[in-house]
């Protein structure tokens, strides 16, 4: 049986299915190449399926038989695509299946921040609700406000749809290219980043992590936002400058924020951001629901099996290796 490594988030049902054909070694936690049993598994592995494994040159040096890394995620900033391509290792991801799930999570963060849901939940549970509520406890409306979506890929579009049809919001967007269908379907307005930051009540960051998006939201960008603005990061922690977010929140340059992602994950419990009352956090869980974990794992398994069988995986990222590896 060919050896494959399953890493962190791969649904149990899918692991069982893979075990019928492959010798599957499962690493449930964030193991890395300093762990001898992980190094040993890498020596033999033909495929890796999982979430957030940093596939670097160093790791590839330890994995001479590796043919494919199948990410159980749409983002693939954990993969060094250039080196993988040089070494004819296929890279795949899971676009599409998670779009609505992530968009739901972003809307959840928008509502929770606007209406201060986690904070008020604590207020009630701690027995602090003793009198008629005053203005200091009130949140802000979501409906009929302006959302500015940075990154109009399929998740950005699903967010725009919810904002437009569900909450009667005006939609602004900034993207590498114009999306005429979004403009037509959700009455969205294409604008430059500066105009979006100045005008939006809700600024939603939904771009992949690339060299050109890294830290794209920093001190200057937070200063451009309204003092009443709510900032949501559903993308990657490294797309923002966390120190600048901290300063913007503590100095009340923006009203509140919600983030699903951090520069380093799992986040250090002493991270200064975690002390802020006007910030809601999630543990990078936007794509992870019970239903979607299975859907993503199934798609990732389909990619893995296709690659190991010598077929073109449906979601191959480094298509340039097709000619040399896949017939
Ligand atoms: C989640 O963050 C993903 O990239 O799928």
Image (tube, grey):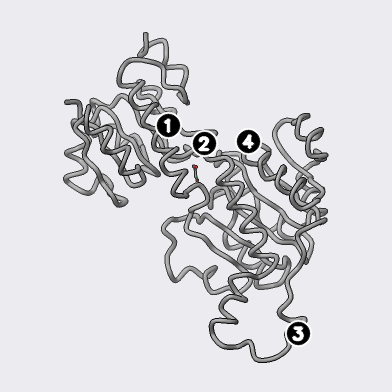
Q: Does residue 246 appear to the left or right of 194 in the view shown?
A: left
Q: Earlier in the sequence, mark 4 or mark 1?
A: 4
Q: Earlier in the sequence, mark 3 or mark 4?
A: 3
The residues tagged by marks 3 and 2 sit, at their Cα atoms, a distance apart of 43 Å
Q: Are marks 3 and 4 in contact (CB under 8 Å)?
A: no
Q: Kindly identify which residue carries mark 3.
A: 134
Q: Kindly identify which residue carries mark 1.
A: 299
Q: Earlier in the sequence, mark 2 or mark 1?
A: 2
Neighbours of disc 1 within 10 Å: few (<14), some (14-19), many (20+):
many
Residue at x 56% of width, y 78% of height = 122
Which element type, helix, strand or loop, lies under badge 1? helix
Q: Are marks 4 and 1 in contact (CB under 8 Å)?
A: no
Measured as percent of width and height from the top left, residue 268 is found at: 42, 65
Q: Kindly identify which residue carries mark 2.
A: 97
Which element type, helix, strand or loop, lies under badge 4? helix
Residue farthest along the bottom direction in this orientation? 130
Which element type, helix, strand or loop, lies under badge 3? loop
Asked where in the image residue 299 lies, by quadrant, the reply is top left
Q: Earlier in the sequence, mark 3 or mark 1?
A: 3
The vertical placement of 20 against 160, above or below, is above
Q: Earlier in the sequence, mark 3 or mark 2?
A: 2
The residues tagged by marks 4 and 2 sit, at their Cα atoms, a distance apart of 10 Å
């Amino acid at each position: 049986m060919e050896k494959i490594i399953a890493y962190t988030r791969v649904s149990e049902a899918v692991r069982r299915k893979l075990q019928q054909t492959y010798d599957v070694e499962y690493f449930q936690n964030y193991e890395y190449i300093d762990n001898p049993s992980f190094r040993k598994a890498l020596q033999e592995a033909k495929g890796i399926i999982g979430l957030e494994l940093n596939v670097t040159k160093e790791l590839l040096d330890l994995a001479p038989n590796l043919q494919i890394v199948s990410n159980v995620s749409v983002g693939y900033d954990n993969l060094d695509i250039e080196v993988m391509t040089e070494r004819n290792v296929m890279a795949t991801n899971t676009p599409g299946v998670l779009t609505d799930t992530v968009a739901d999570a972003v809307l959840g963060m928008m509502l929770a921040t606007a209406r201060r849901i986690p904070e008020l939940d604590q207020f009630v549970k701690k027995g602090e609700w003793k009198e008629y509520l005053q203005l200091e406890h009130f949140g802000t409306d979501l409906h009929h406000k302006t959302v500015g979506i940075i990154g109009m890929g399929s998740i950005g579009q699903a967010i725009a749809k919810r904002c437009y049809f569900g909450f009667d919001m005006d939609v602004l967007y900034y993207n590498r290219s114009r999306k005429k269908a979004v403009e037509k379907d959700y009455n969205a307005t294409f604008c430059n980043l500066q105009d979006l930051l100045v005008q939006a009540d809700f600024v939603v960051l939904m771009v992949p992590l690339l060299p050109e998006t890294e830290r794209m939201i920093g001190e200057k960008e937070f200063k451009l936002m309204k003092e009443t603005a709510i900032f949501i990061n559903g993308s990657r922690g490294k797309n923002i400058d966390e120190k600048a977010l901290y300063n913007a929140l503590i100095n009340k340059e923006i009203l509140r924020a919600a983030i699903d992602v951090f520069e380093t994950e799992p986040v250090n419990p002493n991270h200064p951001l975690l002390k802020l009352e006007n910030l809601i956090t999630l543990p990078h869980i936007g794509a992870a629901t019970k239903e979607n974990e299975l859907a993503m794992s199934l798609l990732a398994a389909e990619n893995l099996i296709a690659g190991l069988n010598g077929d073109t995986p449906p979601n191959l990222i480094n298509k340039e290796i097709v000619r040399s590896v896949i017939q």
